[in-house]
Amino acid sequence: MNKFINTIKNIFSIEELRGRILNTLLFITFFRLGSYIVLPGIDAAKLEQKGEGGLLGLLNMFSGGAFNNASIFALGIMPYISASIAIQLLTIALPYFQKMQKDGESGRKKLNQITRVLTIFVTAAQATAYLQTTIPADAIIVSAWSFRLFAVIILIAGTMFCMWLGEKITDKGVGNGISMLIMIGIVSRFPGSIIGEAQSRGMSGALLFVIEIVALFFVVMGAVMVTQAVRRIPVQYAKQVVGNRTSSVGGERQYIPLKLNSAGVMPIIFAQALMFVPGLLAGSFAEKSEFAQSIAQKFSDFTSLEYNLLFAFLIIVFTFFYTAISINPTQISDDMKRGGGFVPGVKPGEATSTFIADILDRITLPGAFMLAIIAILPALASLFGITRGFASFFGGTSLLILVGVVLDTLQQIESYLLMRKYEGLMQSGRVKGRTEAVAQ
């Protein structure tokens, strides 16, 4: 306890770190307040509350309930993330975007500007669909056409403001701002979920509730291990000889850290976005076929065996796909070769590229299966009688985002402490997995 108190004192004794933490809290406060400001022209009492499952439930979770509240931040930061993913895919597919990515700081600024413009169009499309499908007609208390026109403008402004808050947190706060906003949206639902679970158990189920909390602790620890697991490939750099003197640059061993789960939460998000398709297609034929009706019923229940088998399969496929487009063994090999680096026992060039690709395939397979298990844990928790809101924290997108953002933030705070020669956050050593030496 004394070490914890001393660590807190050390954190707030660093003026720059203290300012960044206070700035982060201030920006988060603005974000949370905005999620309760309802769009003008709506009777909030007549809004329909969407369920926890499916794509709409995912959007509501990321926005911290703003989606169901029909607030000015209803779409949150998700349109910006969609635009960012689209630009990232374009940098792989189109030479024009590849060139911009390789142009250094000027290229990154152009890509950021294109992403912002694309975010406006994505938000406009999503806002139109959101107003058409989510807001009941009887909840609109003004002219329908004027409401939709001004609501789309307000939702675009809300998303752009959330994007600005995320960038400000990154620049003047602690951690990655965009990820921080998503995490806050998820965490804001945790107190209500745990209170709801405790009330559902009552005094007679107090022991079972304690067991659930212990199980949640071990699930979180498992998610941390999967997130932090790294396969390090040793890279040796030759010493540079200039004249009669040997340069001190080079001659040292570094590592390429290949993560067990290089794709992060993206496979779960992609898979969850497609899981409504089987039920939608089957539902259109439900009146003519009992089989289609059965399929629609099974895929509308996220705890069914068929739903989770398909969900796990899609996650495994998307894990390999996203890892393949985000990590290029050939580029890594070429960068090493230009820098005078080599993997001991492996020839530079194509042999090194093949070596890295083989290792990546071997670690991606168990990583994909572990990610699929984490994704279906909320369904298993629901089958054991845990309320749906609390079960969502036993795995899936919410847990992985929470673990990843918390680890990133702790690592950044610890870097400030170590830079000022204070003790780190952990007595056993540094927060690992984020600052490993990467071979360039």
Image: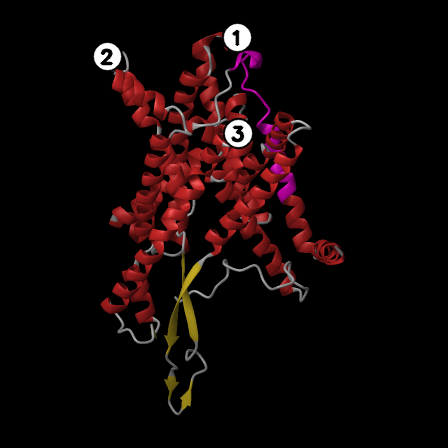
Q: CB under 8 Å between callouts 3 and 1?
A: no
- Mark pair 3, 1: CA separation: 40 Å
Say what amino acid the circle numbered 2 marks. Answer: Lys
Q: Earlier in the sequence, mark 3 or mark 2?
A: 2
Q: Give the residue number, with chain letter if any, for mark 3.
A: 385
Give the class, few, some or many, for how many residues have Cα within 10 Å of label 3's Cα (few <14, many ≥20). Answer: few
Q: Give the residue number, with chain letter if any, for mark 1.
A: 141
Say what amino acid the circle numbered 3 marks. Answer: Gly
- Labels in figure, total: 3
- Looking at the image, which residue is at 42% across and 75% down? 253
Say what amino acid the circle numbered 1 marks. Answer: Ile
Q: Is residue 237 above or below residue 191?
A: below
Residue 288: assigned label = 2
- Mark pair 3, 2: CA separation: 35 Å
Of the pair 322 and 307, the residue shown nearer to us: 307
Left or right: where does residue 107 sit relative to residue 209? left
Q: Quadrant of the N terminus?
A: bottom right
Looking at the rendered image, the disc whose residue lies closer to the viewer, 2 or 1, is 2
